[in-house]
Amino acid sequence: MHPDISWFISKAFYQSKLLDYEGIMTLVGEPDYYTKLAMPPISFFHVAGQEAFVDSTYQNQVEAEFVVKCYDFLKKKLPGFDRKKLGIITPYNGQAALIRNLIRDNDGTLFCEVEVNSVDSFQGREKDIVIFSTVRAKYDGMEEDKVQTIGFLKDKRRMNVGLSRARIGLIVIGDLERLRKARAADKWKFLGDYCSQKGRCFRADTTNMDEYFNSFQKKPEDYLVKFKERKDKKSKKPKEIKDGKDEKLVKEATEEKGEKEIVAE
């Protein structure tokens, strides 16, 4: 596992007690994912989709379509792309079924040739690249100012399992605004801040996804998500933590007061 991924996993779930093997970068190497695509080891794509409750499970059509376009981008741009080394993970069976159907349509095949499944189905295994679809977003009739719940996403064990399956590339796709404002979502806030501080939190354009990925590859900095501070007299100064891998300062994202608001423009 690349140190940028393991650092987050260790800090978020193990009180920084997990340490990397000293020769880990030799094992990780320089795969085409970094050199040909210039993709970072860990990234978050903010998709302003809409969740829907369908047949006792959740789905997010826009987010699922973006996941498939991301998969298609990897398939077309990576030389010798091996579908078996990619895993697409989501907390909801409904979203997994939707993504499988979209991939079949995209590839023109009878069966989905990529493993798309729930978090629990991936336990104990690794994939070179993982795309994680969070699903939960705004919905019809949602009260904007009311603190919302995020269901399975607040389960820290499942979050840990889902995000720690990636060996060289972790791509998280979801509505960062919803995740940051949700109840019991401190780990998601931390992930958003971590990616933002490293310049790896991007705004997704869902109006023309094919053009988006071509443009993104050429100039990803044009799509960086910006944050602004909400003024709150009761807010505490965010605690700063030092990233032992690259000595950059990363702000702790567990403050309930004075959290940053997302501006995706």
Image (cartoon, grey):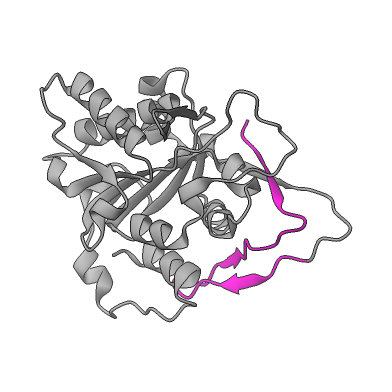
Q: Is residue 245 magenta?
A: yes
Magenta region, main secondary structure: loop
Residue 122 screen position, x and y as percent: 24, 54
Can you say whether 90 is above or below 13 in the image? Answer: above
Magenta stretch bounds: 237-265
Which quadrant: the C terminus? top right
Residue 151 screen position, x and y as percent: 51, 47
In front here: 67 or 97? 97
Q: Is residue 246 visible?
A: no
Can you say whether 19 is above or below 35 in the image? Answer: below
In front here: 66 or 42? 66
Q: Is residue 116 magenta?
A: no
Q: Is residue 237 visible?
A: yes
Residue 1 screen position, x and y as percent: 28, 65
Identify the residue shown where x is 20% and y is 60%.
125
Residue 228 screen position, x and y as percent: 72, 45
Of all residues, the one furthest to the front in this rendering is 56
Can you say whether 59 is above or below 253 in the image? Answer: above
Identify the residue shown where x is 37% and y is 41%.
92
